[in-house]
Amino acid sequence: MEKELANHNDENSAQDLDEETLFLVSQTFKALSDPTRIRILNLLFIKEFSVNEIAKQLDLRQSTVSHQLRFLKNLRLVKYRREGTTLYYSHDDEHVMNMLQQTIEHCSHH
Amino acid sequence: MEKELANHNDENSAQDLDEETLFLVSQTFKALSDPTRIRILNLLFIKEFSVNEIAKQLDLRQSTVSHQLRFLKNLRLVKYRREGTTLYYSHDDEHVMNMLQQTIEHCSHH
DNA sequence: TTGTTATATGAACATCTATTCATATATCGA
DNA sequence: TCGATATATGAATAGATGTTCATATAACAA
């Protein structure tokens, strides 16, 4: 019996990722690959904001912000609470927010 | 004088990222947002591989691998050494590889 | 109910992206 | 030089993505 590898795959002789993991990983990074979504998440470091507040702060159309928030919401990277007709969005994934912060820090010393 | 904020921006009243940082951050995550590039980098966790070895291991066309390696090379996420006509590629950014590893770990418990 | 405000949604569009094929370039050995 | 092998590159293409406009939905107050 061969010594067990750190890797947990089997038949494929390889170290390749299973399809679902691959999809989730790529989606996670895709969320962070768009400047608009980065700006929104970066804003949410501070505190929760409504859709209109985000649009105003970042000088974006309301529909642009709403579409991007939906994207982030689907990935559970943000959540919201309702107050009347207003929805306050906040971040909802510590792991991703940590990565973002690290990378911003890393890149801002260009 | 107001208490100083953690944030280092100034005139824009805001917390917005400067354009160059924004671009670098988005590019970094874009590199990790494509399944093919993820698989290539994941393979390079193990050891260096030639272009053809990567293509064979991952069942990809040689030109696909070459194009993606160029992309990763431009971002200095991989490097290579030559041995005759063969180029051996290896990873070249610890920060990015750590993020990738963390996220694969994070997502493989789906 | 009606009007107002906040947000979501769908379609259209332009742009970007990844892959493929065909071919060019480069290194080496004979 | 010639042939063989390894890799890079350019053009073409199909598909994905982000933004916008117009409009729908939802909550609330009067």
Image (tube, coloured by chain):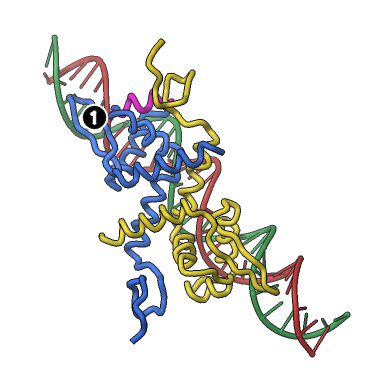
Chain colours: A yellow, B blue, C green, D red
Total numbered labels placed on residues in the image: 1
Start-end of magenta stretch: B50-59
Instruction: Say which residue appears at 45% left-offset and 60% top-offset.
Output: A38
- Camera-side residue of C3 and B106: B106
Question: What is the magenta segment's predominant secondary structure?
Answer: helix
- Is residue D23 positioned above or below C17 on the image? below
The residue closer to the viewer here, B15 or B50, is B15
| Percent coordinates x, y for residue C29 in the rendering | 14, 14
Q: Residue at x 52, y 42 (%)?
A: A24
- Residue at 37% over, 53% down: B27
Q: Quadrant of the N terminus of chain A?
A: top left
Q: Residue at x 52, y 76 (%)?
A: A56
Task: Give coordinates of residue A25: x percent, y percent.
Answer: 48, 42
Q: Position of residue A18 (x, y in %)?
A: 51, 31
Task: Work out which residue is located at the far front of the displayed protein and give it.
Answer: B3
**Residue that carries the numbered disc 1 in the rendered image:** B87
- Check residue B27 for magenta coloring: no
Numbered disc 1: what chain? B
Q: Going by the image, does A65 lie left or right of C1? A: left
Residue type highlighted by circle 1: Leu
Q: Secondary structure at mark 1?
A: strand
* Residue toward you, C11 or B78: B78
x, y percent for residue C11? 67, 58
Number of other residues with Cα within 10 Å of mark 1, as a class: few under 14, some 14 to 19, many 20 or more: some
Q: Is residue B98 above or below residue A13?
A: below
Q: Is residue B44 above or below residue B13?
A: above
Left or right placement of residue A48 versus residue C5 in this view? left
